[in-house]
Amino acid sequence: MFGVVPKSIWQKTNPADSNNLIDMAMRCLLIEDGNRLVLVDTGIGNKQSEKFFSHYYLHGEASLDSSLAKLGFHRNDITDVFLTHLHFDHCGGAIELDSASGQFRPAFANAVYWTNERHWQWATKPNPREKASFLSENILPIMESGQLKYIERPADLAPTPLGFEVVFVDGHTDSMMLPLITMNGRKFCYMADLLPSVGHIPLAYVMGYDTRPLITLDEKARLLRRATDEQWVLIYEHDPINECSTLLDTEKGIRVGEIMTLAQAL
C-alpha cells in the first residue's frame, strides 16, 4: 500500500498486524441533489467465492444496504452509480448474483451506471498487471443491462451531467475519476485511490498497485497544491479512521490539516 516507503516509516500511521496486513475501509459516498441520489463507488460486494474473500480478511458489520437504511434509503432509490474506476473493491457491489437464475445483474435496478469510455476499454481489455483487479462479472453485466453511460473526458477536469466536476487521473489506473463537489461554497474531493488514506499524503507514499507511479507523483503534487490553496475537504475512501481532512503547508511539504467527519465538514 506504500510502495517504496519502508515499513518502519509507514507503520507509524498505518500499523500492521501479525500477518503484515493493515486496516482499510471501503467508504462509499452518497450525494442527494434534488431528485437525484448518486452513489459513488460500491465496495467489494458479496458475490465472490469464499476463497476470494479469504485473501482480504473482511471484518466489521457495515454493509451498503445497512448504511443506506440508516439514512432512510433503499438501493432502489439510487438514480446514479458513479464508479471512480473498475477495480473489484470499488465496483464489486455494483453487480449482484440472482440466486434464482444464477445470473449476474445490476444491484441498483433503477440507476444509470457512469464510467468513461477510455477506462472502460482499459478495464475490459486488461493488462497482465491489473487483470486480477478487473473481474468480468463486475463489469460486463453493466453494459449488458443497458444501464451504462460514459462521462466524456475533454480535459483533465470536466463537468458532468451529474452536477459536479470530475478530475481525471491516470497514475493508479487509466482514466480514474475523482468527483469534485461544491457544497455550501466549499469544494469536496473524493480521493479514491489517488490518496487512499491520510497516511498517503506525503508525495513519495505511492501504492505499489499503481500502474504509473511517476505520473501518480505528478498528479498528487498538482492536486494537493490546488486543494491546499483552495481549502478543499478531501474524502478518504480507504482510511479506516479518518473520513475527511483539509491540508496544510508545512516546512516538510503539504501535510494533513484538520481531520473531521463529513458531517462536521458540511
Image (cartoon, helix red, strand yellow):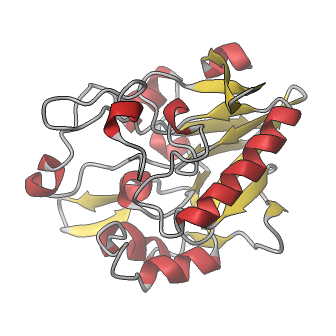
* The C terminus sits in image quarter: top right
97 relative position to 210: left or right: left
Q: Is residue 156 above or below residue 5?
A: below
Which residue is rendered at x = 26% and y = 26% of the image?
60
Q: In this view, does 19 lie above or below 165?
A: above
Spot occupied by residue 193 in the image (x, y as percentages of width and height): 52, 51
Judging depth in this view, the residue of 261 and 34 nearest the camera is: 261
Spot occupied by residue 58 in the image (x, y as percentages of width and height): 22, 37
49 relative position to 203: left or right: left
Furthest-left residue in view?
A: 51
Q: Is residue 162 at all visible to an observer of this figure?
A: no
Spot occupied by residue 163 in the image (x, y as percentages of width and height): 81, 50
Quadrant in which residue 141 is drawn: bottom left
Quadrant in which residue 19 is drawn: top left
Q: In this view, does 123 lie above or below 157?
A: below
73 relative position to 223: left or right: left
